[in-house]
Amino acid sequence: MKNGSPKTQKSLCIRIVSAVILFTFTFTSIIPPSYAQSVILPTPGAMVTPSMAYVPALLKGMTLHKDNPFQFDFIIDNGQSGLQGDELKKESQRLVKYFLASMTVPQNDLWVNLSPVEKNRIVPDALGKTELGQDLLAQDYILKQLTATLMYPEGELGKKFWDRIYKEAKEKYGVTDIPTDTFNKVWILPESATIYENGATVYVVDAKLKVMLDEDYLAANQSTSSQAASSHPAFSSLSSRAQTRDPGSKNGLLDSRLRGND
């Protein structure tokens, strides 16, 4: 009989947990961002069920004015919100505030963290004073509640989840003694964006996020940082891909690398 090491057993558990989180984040809508603050957040330990897929109103693009650099025309996609009139205007203003906050808050401070082992590292002070920071915290809170609900061992999906973990641990390592209270930190990061550019107007055609385990994030961070340092001292530690579509080019696509600290 094979006896896997505690580190190997924990790794298996973490990998499966991360897959559930990735599925949850990608294929369900927890709560529309525009309603994050208007809805009463669930109490700790409360069950949260997935909602139907939902596309909220989104800021999709903008037009710059060369004669007035402080004037912007924002392009809002109504999505499935059904908002009109004053409600749409109010929501559009919220999205514009999100954008302006992301442009003015230092890039290294664009994060929120509800890790129970990092109670003094929740949100940077500058971001926490903005609507963007407050709504990101609300989303992170509900995401954790939803994940815990789906993994609840007495629920239908949670029972299948843990049965699968125990089965694979038994088959691969000959053990079933896996702690169910293991804390697993994951990172939700920007991955790629496809941008259409026409004159002074830009439009986000597609944007994706990625989910990484803490150990994978730190490894990628260290690897990318080493490569960047060897090529250019101003390069930062993480990179994400952006594709800019240029109507004037022959193939229509120009690839570029955007780099920024997390």
Image (cartoon, rainbow, N blue to C red):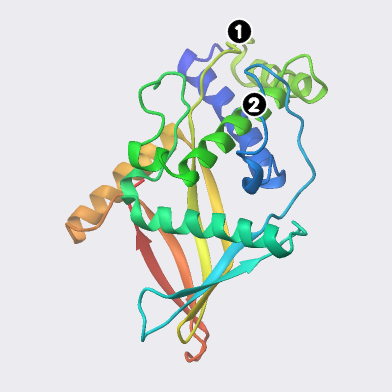
> Where residue 203 sits: x, y (%)?
55, 73
> Where residue 243 sits: x, y (%)?
48, 71
Height in image: 213 above or below 85?
above
Image quadrant assignment for residue 161: top right
Image quadrant assignment for residue 100: bottom left
> Where residue 103 sits: x, y (%)?
38, 58
Label drawn at residue 145: 2
The N terminus, quarter of image: top right
> Where residue 207 sits: x, y (%)?
56, 60
Report the number of numbered marks.
2
Height in image: 262 above or below 65?
above
Amino acid bearing label 1: Asp
Residue at 66% of width from left, 66% of height from top? 77
Q: Are marks 2 and 1 in contact (CB under 8 Å)?
A: no
Label drawn at residue 83: none
Q: Secondary structure at mark 1?
A: loop
Q: Is residue 32 left or right of residue 233?
A: right
Residue at 19% of width from left, 61% of height from top? 232
Depth order, front residue of 252/80: 80
The alpha-carbon separation of the residues under discs 2 and 1 comes to: 25 Å
Residue at 78% of width from left, 59% of height from top? 82
Q: Residues within 10 Å of mark 2 (few under 14, many from 20)?
A: many
Depth order, front residue of 135/85: 85
Q: Secondary structure at mark 2?
A: helix
Residue at 34% of width from left, 55% of height from top? 104
Q: Furthest-front residue in view? A: 86
Height in image: 161 above or below 110?
above
Q: Residues within 10 Å of mark 1 (few under 14, many from 20)?
A: few
Depth order, front residue of 148/215: 148
Label drawn at residue 177: 1
